[in-house]
Amino acid sequence: MTLETVKQSRVLRLALLTAFFLPKGVFAHGMHVAEPIDFSLPFNLYVLGSVIAVVVSFLLMGIFNGSTTSSTSSFHVHLLTLRSVRALYTNNLLRNLVRAFGVASFLLLITSGLFGVQNAQENITPIGVWVLFGVGLTFFTMLIGDIWSLLHPIASLLYNSPSLSLGTTFGSPVFSS
């Protein structure tokens, strides 16, 4: 067998094993409700409000992010000059703790989603994915920098395993270890 065939067979086995353990039914976003949802306002007003919110946000971005100012006049901070941020990327113990936290969070969300309560209001997975990851990590990245290159659970699992890497490099090349 060639190396490429071995890699493809590993991916196929992993996909089949994952499909075997998938739950029989997942009821996310309240789609399992047999009764229609009664909105307090007509549905057309919800759609109109959504359209207005998107249009206004794009107009504001166009107004405040105009090309009239030069890029040199904006405020820039090189994050690696800050001691705490530099330690996050250069200290092996701290970097491995952040990677372990990313893997543990990933496994918690996967386990909770597969084997936990299938009610979205009682399960931590929707909050973990949409609020903590989708919103929280976005703001944290804006303030601190590229933290995803360390938190990425798949990259962290493959970090010390070149035989499982499938020829893919994860993470930011700027902060290579």
Image (tube, rainbow, N blue to C red):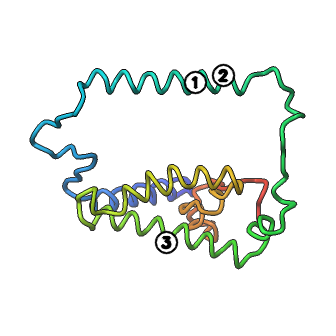
3 or 1: mark nearer the eye: 1
Q: Quadrant of residue 31?
A: top left
The disc labelled 3 sits on which kind of residue?
A: Ala
Callout 3: 10 Å neighbours few (<14), some, many (20+)?
few
What mark, if any, has residue 62 been given in the picture? Answer: 2
User: Dot 1: within a 10 Å radius of its alpha carbon, few (fewer than 14), some, or many (20 or more) residues?
Assistant: few
Q: CA distance from mark 2 to mark 1?
A: 6 Å
Q: Is residue 3 left or right of residue 44?
A: right
Tell me the residue that label 1 is attached to: 58
* Pointers 3 and 2 in contact (C-beta within 8 Å): no
Q: Residue at x 65, y 63 (%)?
A: 150
Answer with the quarter of the image where residue 165 lies. Answer: bottom right
* Front residue of 175 and 130: 130
**Up/down of 17 relative to 4, above or below:** below
Q: What label does residue 104 carry, if any?
A: 3
Calculate the distance from the C-alpha at mark 3 to the C-alpha at mark 2. Answer: 40 Å
In the rendering, at what x and y percent does residue 63 appear?
A: 68, 22
The location of residue 153, given as percent across then percent down, is: 54, 63
Q: CA distance from mark 3 to mark 1?
A: 37 Å
- Look at the numbered discs 2 and 1 and tell me whether their residues touch, using CB distance below 8 Å: yes
Seen from the viewer's position, the closer of residues 102 and 156 is 102
Q: Earlier in the sequence, mark 3 or mark 1?
A: 1
- Residue 125 % position (x, y): 37, 60
